[in-house]
Image: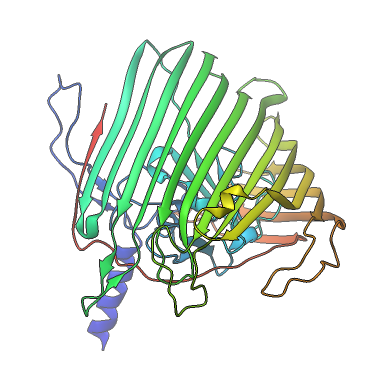
Amino acid sequence: MKRNALCLGLASILASAPVFATLPAPAPDTDVDTRFDTVVVTAAAQTSPLTFEIDPKTPRQPVPASDGADYLKTIPGFSAIRNGGTNGDPVLRGMFGSRLKLLTNDSEMLGACPMRMDNPMSYVSPETYDKLIVIKGPQTVIWGPGSSAGTVRFERDTERFEQAGWRGYAGLLAGSWGRNDQVVDASGGAPEGYVRMTANRSAQDDYEDGDGHRVPSRWMKWNADVEAGWTPDTDTRLVATIGAGDGEARYAGRGMDGSQFKRQSGVLRFEKVRMGRVLDAIEASVFSNYADHVMDNYSLRDPDPNGAMPMPMASNVDRRTTGGRFATTWRWGDSFSLITGLDQQSNTHRARNAPGRDVYKTKPWIADARFSSAGAFAELTWKPAAGDRLIAGARIDRAAAKDKRLKTGGMMPMPNPTAGVTRRDTLDSGFIRYERDLASAPATPCMPVSATSSASLISGNCSRHPRPRWARSMRFHR
């Protein structure tokens, strides 16, 4: 019994730590390193009691993630509601949906499906980002409302060119069940500015169960983004990013497949840091993200004449999310720092559907909901002594939602009693946390207290998909 307990304990420790493999160093005059990657992540390491910061390009096991939820599962506390082979919905400590703030490049890319077939992580390819930052729990107020479960940020942070040149990253993967990935990340520039292009394609086929029956689970997706930056000095940056993507996915556990996951994104960001005065930093950003999602039962399967939908049917939903953020950082010596700012977001959701193959394309778009919120926030950090920190934050938001549905859903729609009604509410949230670094051990205990008020809508669906039985990958850096 003791031996079994010891083995189980060692296994749990090894499963929660990164795995390192060291290879011989290249020759001193080697400019390009084409070796296989030397670090493989099986579980992410923690950087503070509540925060993880990871390089998503670091290889992970079992294979590179096809979406954001797949990568988040390497972080302790995360799981995912499986949605076939890809497009899983992340769950942090049992909470998901609108309780988990999911951001890319400081913007929010919300999906359009009311059943979260295209949740925000469906549009994320982790290997095309430079940093993944996770804050567990409602322990920050500076990234928007509704983060009672936590805040997840996928960020691109292009390093300034000290001299004219280029750098790049590329990867290839091949595995069983037809799994194949291609990714490229290349940038070129000079001290005054740069241009960066990231693109990827990821796909996998259906798999067979133990009895040799094919299980619908095939998927394919691609993303491409172009970023242009102006960097007049090391502390000033103006960055514009535009991007697009699309994909498809077959599902064994749903009545419809996802035949389109179209994405269009645009972000403009400015930052001025290390100003050396009481006002130490300024950040500003605006964004516009558009999701156009199609669900049907005929593009990737044949309609089941004995099922609930015996005839070809399709539903097309889209969402336009626009917003902006302005934040300032203030410092008084080494003891006090304060982040203050404003943010705003607006959403318009539309839908159209019809029986028949592609008949929905002839139907007009009908807006069924509008959402908006505007908020102000402040977060203070006080360091009363070396190793001690007191962090407190508060924010207030004014939220509004308008129901534009003329009829209710279902097989027998009725006039909608809340058609045209707008609900408005003022939502407040805050937290206070004390941290202390222990001198006797590499540990930082913390005591957080938080309170939030917000509304959330959650839903999900579950189906399994096996990992490839084998996979081979190569990575190239310059």
Position above or below: 428 against 108: below
Q: Measuring 51% from the left and 72% from the top, which residue is drawn there?
A: 309
**Residue 160 image point, x, y percent:** 45, 20
Could you tell me if residue 45 is visible in this image? no
Q: Nearer the viewer, residue 236 or 182?
A: 182
The reply, left or right, for residue 220 in relation to residue 443 is: left
**Residue 365 image point, x, y percent:** 67, 48
**Residue 469 image point, x, y percent:** 20, 63
Q: Measuring 75% from the left and 68% from the top, which residue is drawn there?
A: 408
Question: Coloring scheme of the render?
Answer: rainbow
**Quarter of the rendering occupied by the N terminus:** bottom left
Q: Measuring 23% from the left and 33% from the top, which residue is drawn there?
A: 476
Q: Nearer the viewer, residue 50 or 184?
A: 184
The reply, left or right, for residue 182 in relation to residue 347 is: left
The reply, left or right, for residue 80 in relation to residue 382 is: left
**Residue 434 image point, x, y percent:** 65, 55
Q: Measuring 72% from the left and 37% from the top, which residue is drawn there?
A: 338
Q: Nearer the viewer, residue 184 or 438?
A: 184
- Going by the picture, which residue comes out furthest to the bottom? 1
Q: Nearer the viewer, residue 441 or 418?
A: 418
Counting labels gives 0
Among the 4 quarters of the image, the one containing residue 409:
bottom right
The reply, left or right, for residue 284 in relation to residue 465 is: right
